[in-house]
Amino acid sequence: MTPLLPPVHDATDENAPDAPSTLSRRKFFAVSAVAATGLTALHGSLSARTPAAADVATGACTTIPDTPTAARPDPQANWRDFSAAETTLAFRNHGMQAELLREAVTPLGAHYLLIHFDIPKLSAAEYNVAIGGRVRAPSRLSLDAIKSRRTVTQSVTMECAGTGRSTVHPRAVYVPWAKEDIGTYQWTGTPLRAVLEEAGLLDDAVEVLFTGWDSGVDLGVEHAFERSLPIAEALRDEVMLAWGANGQPLLPQHGFPLRLIVPRWYGMASVKWLRAITVLNEPFKGVEQAKVYRYQQVKGESGEPVTLKRVISAMAPPGIPDAISRHRFIAPGSHTIQGAAWSGSGRVTRVEFSADGARSWRNAELVKVSDDPYAWTQWRARWEVNTPGEYVLASRATDEAGNVQPLDPQRAWNRQGMGVNGVQRIAVTVQRGIGGAGVNAPSRARAAVPGAEVPPVVRVTNSMDAR
């Protein structure tokens, strides 16, 4: 896995504790120069909440079993070492490529994926979804019947609840996301509300349960993936049954032929491969509701449920990357730094940009890319840099509810690694001459890192001259 920059206390965080752990400025930049960047977050302060010693693994990386167990492994103290199982999950559940943050809509197929079990093989022609439980008129709706209803298309930014998991320590064991588990599609479907109202909600209805066709074993329990929403949330106008994305039928990995889209919530609520909608008169207590997707601080506690997306921003990586570490190189000059920001609590009202490791900030320009309130807001900032050297870029978002990204990802620590929305930092080397290889053909290779072996210059003879 790509290594992460080490945690560094940021003195500008007014909520920092009294006795922070710090790195010197010189050491900080020395480490930054060789570490991973892209959407991988530099961690900010190491000094915030420290989990109880009995609550987490200590010393070396705790053994992660190769066979199923009835409990998830404890968070790993050796937070930069990833198990074979986690790397397999990372290959299976890919993130969005960071450079696509420049696009208003994520290209089809580039949206992040989180597939809990297996992709079921389903046919649109034979598909139907059962509507039942505490309703007056249970029914089954075919895909054609659902498509015949009022159709809406809306841009929605989706984000996995495990965002930022690999940026805090001890690190929870599961897909080791940084900030790449995002995407904005233009979803096409029909509002869920009308479907529920036509079924006739009974007076004792409390929640609506959504069951997918995918099933497997988690926490030692075999179950279908299913999640519930409170009645009030299920009846929100923007919640939809979607059969298309970006003008095309859903891809198999994105829930073909029908899925739920819950715009304000983290992605786990948007159940894929929808099989049934069941209205309940009591809260659902399934594995993926009562045991997983919880903000747990101590082992064994129930914790708070993961619901709305926390305010967050991400940056399109500037310049060009190192192939392995994804560290960025850029030439001196004037550059436009771009990114996107979003929140489940309302529109983003402010994004700040920093070019000095989050020590000082200035407002970025917000760029409206959609009238849909649940799509990300893009931002851009000019960066004038004339002195070669090592820099750390950062962005911080604020939403209309007043929520601000924390400077320190560690402040969002929880045992399952959910909703970690700390400020992202990207290390950049400003170097004269960088960027020329992408201009000429054949390419003009040059040494960007000391000790590199540069191949010989390709000499081209014009075909006319050879006659």
Image (cartoon, rainbow, N blue to C red):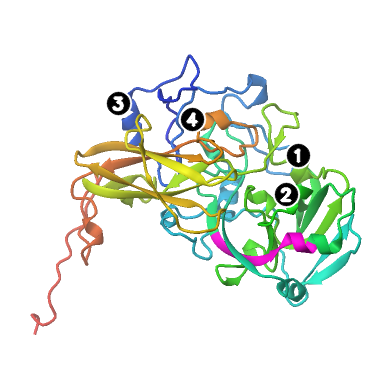
The residue singled out by tag 2 in the image is 233
Q: Amino acid at mark 4?
A: Asp
Helix, strand or loop at label 2? It is helix
Distance between the alpha carbons at the discs numbered 2 and 1: 21 Å
Q: Residues within 10 Å of mark 4 (few under 14, many from 20)?
A: many
Residue drawn at x 85%, y 62% as measured from the top left? 199
Horizontal and vertical percent position of residue 1: 49, 44
Q: Is label 3 in a helix, a strand or a loop?
A: helix
Would you name the residue on which mark 3 appears? Answer: 26
Residue drawn at the location 56% of the way across and 43% of the way down: 163
First along the sequence among labels 4 and 1: 1
**Quarter of the image holding residue 74?**
top right
Q: Which mark is first along the chain, 1 or 2?
A: 2
Residue 2 visible here: no
Are the two marked residues, 2 and 4, in contact with CB atoms closer than 8 angstroms?
no
What kind of element bears circle 1?
A: helix
Observer-side mark, 4 or 1, equals 4
Q: Position of residue 97 (x, y in %)?
A: 46, 55
CA–CA distance in space, label 4 to label 3:
20 Å
Q: Position of residue 250 (x, y in %)?
A: 63, 68
